[in-house]
């Protein structure tokens, strides 16, 4: 593939790895970056691969219409090449169409699919010619027409039909459309100032001196959204002055309401951003235990804490799905449970295609076992914070309701009591008192958290 532009060659490799299940998108992108020396090629390869995954549903519909065959009838390699080319033609206007088509044809030949080169050339040239009249469902004039609404949401806005149908039923057409459009946009780089060492204002000033422009996050009190430049390429990234952490995730960490001198447990702690928030709140007189299971995640957690100077945080390896080797001595336990990740589709676009509706019950059962284990470590009168980065009720309020039904010693804490002095806006709490961020309402990924208190008796 030496004749193919390096960024397009690596984007093809990323897409193949993800769609074959050999790697998730961040891991595949990291491997591709190691093979590319030019920062511009690195950025372009990642952009092409992520964009293709975002718009794969719509791209497949266009390819199938212009090729006059369903996508299952394509060789996988040919389909990936067509997807990559179609995405570039339709969404990257700065890329010359002739270069896109030429590289796609060469990719087909180099992948051992020489007989498909003519098909690739013809389909992509037609997409380029007819870009203003693509065979995609238009926005329905009458959103109450369920089929027309779902065709538009699932195909044109490129989401699995089962997921679009769920969200349409739950929030209505206008909100569902805004949600899907949010998921199809690029995710900003968001930092949290390491308040063990600095403040948000001081971090913003240091970034500006390094040529990085930022603005304060709207809802997270210690967050900065990067508007220009890459702080990861500066010495500040190695100084521990900040961690990369989504704004909605920062709100969950703040909800723990860590206070000086408290004993705190972060039961699923990697990569460590919330553990740092808890350590800053607990102060030098407090104790923070950060736990995770897999060796690589424990190593990542330890590295994050070490770089941030959180020397008082104790890292342990433990399975949060089993009874924890800890006594009920903690003032607060955070369980940020592994979940479907359906609230983070904007940041991880391949999740929408990897998940199935049938996954939710299986994941909820695991989360319920983890909540049982975490609850046993909370001291009488202490707090238990349950959180996910999922939008789905099976993993969120239904898990909490099931737990409370079996544990009358626990009760939900209303927002006014759950987050005093945290700076969290009332807008991020729903009527039931849960922290819940919505893409269509807050412009943030869909996260959920509930605060439970163990009775003092």
Image (cartoon, rainbow, N blue to C red):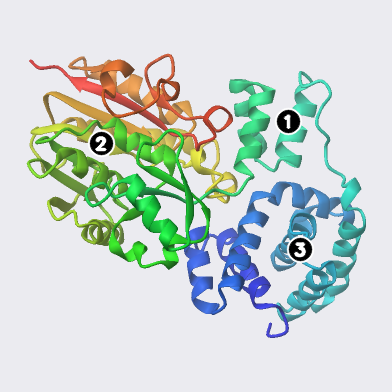
Residue in the foreground of this view, choosing between 136 and 187: 187
Looking at the image, is mark 1 or mark 3 earlier in the sequence? 3
In the image, residue 370 sits, relative to residue 457, either above or below, namely below
User: Which mark is in front, 1 or 2?
Assistant: 2
Q: Which mark is residue 150?
A: 1
- Name the residue beneath numbered marker 2: 334
Question: Counting other residues with Cα less than 10 Å from the Cα at mark 3, is it few (<14), some (14-19), or many (20 or more)?
Answer: few
Residue at 76% across, 66% down: 95
Q: Secondary structure at mark 3?
A: loop
Residue 227 lies, in percent from the top left, at 53, 51
Q: Secondary structure at mark 2?
A: strand
User: Which mark is in front, 3 or 2?
Assistant: 3
- Name the residue beneath numbered marker 3: 94
Residue 245 can be seen in this image: yes
Residue at 87% across, 45% down: 135
Residue at 89% across, 48% down: 132
Q: 28 left or right of 261? A: right
Residue in the foreground of this view, choosing between 255 and 57: 255
Looking at the image, is mark 3 or mark 2 earlier in the sequence? 3
Q: Secondary structure at mark 1?
A: helix
Looking at the image, is mark 1 or mark 2 earlier in the sequence? 1
Residue 129 lies, in percent from the top left, at 92, 58
Question: Counting other residues with Cα less than 10 Å from the Cα at mark 2, is it few (<14), some (14-19), or many (20 or more)?
Answer: many
């Amino acid at each position: 593939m030496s004749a193919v532009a390096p960024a397009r060659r690596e984007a093809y490799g990323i897409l193949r790895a993800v769609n074959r299940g050999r790697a998730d998108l961040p891991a595949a992108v990291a491997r591709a970056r190691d093979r590319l020396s030019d920062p511009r090629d690195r950025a372009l390869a990642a952009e092409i691969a992520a964009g293709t995954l975002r718009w794969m549903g719509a791209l497949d519909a266009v390819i199938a219409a212009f090729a006059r065959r369903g996508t299952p009838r394509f060789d996988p390699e040919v389909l990936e090449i067509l997807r990559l080319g179609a995405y570039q033609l339709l969404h990257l206007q700065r890329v010359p169409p002739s270069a896109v088509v030429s590289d796609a044809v060469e990719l087909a030949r180099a992948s051992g699919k020489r007989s498909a080169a003519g098909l690739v050339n013809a389909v992509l040239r037609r997409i380029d010619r007819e870009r203003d009249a693509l065979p995609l469902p238009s926005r329905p004039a009458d959103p109450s027409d369920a089929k027309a609404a779902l065709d538009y949401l699932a195909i044109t806005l490129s989401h699995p039909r089962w997921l679009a149908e769920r969200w349409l039923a739950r929030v209505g057409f206008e909100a569902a459309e805004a949600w899907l459009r949010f998921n199809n946009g690029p995710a900003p780089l968001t930092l949290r100032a390491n308040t063990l060492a600095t403040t948000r204002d001081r971090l913003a000033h240091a970034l500006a001196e390094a040529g990085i422009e930022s603005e304060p996050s709207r809802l997270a009190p210690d967050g900065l959204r990067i508007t220009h430049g890459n702080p990861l390429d500066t010495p500040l990234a190695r100084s521990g002055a900040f961690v990369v952490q989504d704004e909605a995730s920062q709100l969950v960490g703040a909800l723990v309401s860590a206070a000086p001198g408290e004993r705190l447990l972060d039961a699923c702690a990697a990569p460590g951003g919330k553990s740092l928030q808890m350590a800053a709140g607990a102060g030098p007189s407090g104790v923070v235990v950060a736990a995770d299971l897999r060796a690589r995640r424990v190593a990542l957690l330890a590295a994050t804490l070490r770089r941030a100077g959180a020397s008082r945080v104790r890292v342990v390896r433990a399975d949060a799905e089993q009874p924890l080797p800890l006594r009920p001595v903690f003032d607060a336990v955070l369980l940020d449970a592994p979940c479907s990740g359906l609230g983070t589709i904007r940041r991880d676009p391949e999740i929408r295609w990897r998940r199935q509706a049938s996954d939710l019950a299986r994941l909820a059962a695991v989360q319920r076992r983890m909540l049982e284990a975490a609850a046993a470590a909370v001291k009488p009168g202490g707090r238990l914070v349950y959180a996910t980065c999922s939008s789905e009720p099976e993993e969120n309020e239904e898990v909490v309701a099931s737990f409370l039904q079996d544990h009358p010693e626990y009760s939900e804490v209303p927002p006014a009591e759950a987050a005093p002095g945290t700076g969290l806006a009332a807008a991020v709490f729903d009527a039931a008192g849960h922290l819940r961020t919505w893409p269509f309402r807050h412009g943030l990924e869909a996260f959920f958290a509930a605060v439970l208190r163990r009775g003092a008796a």
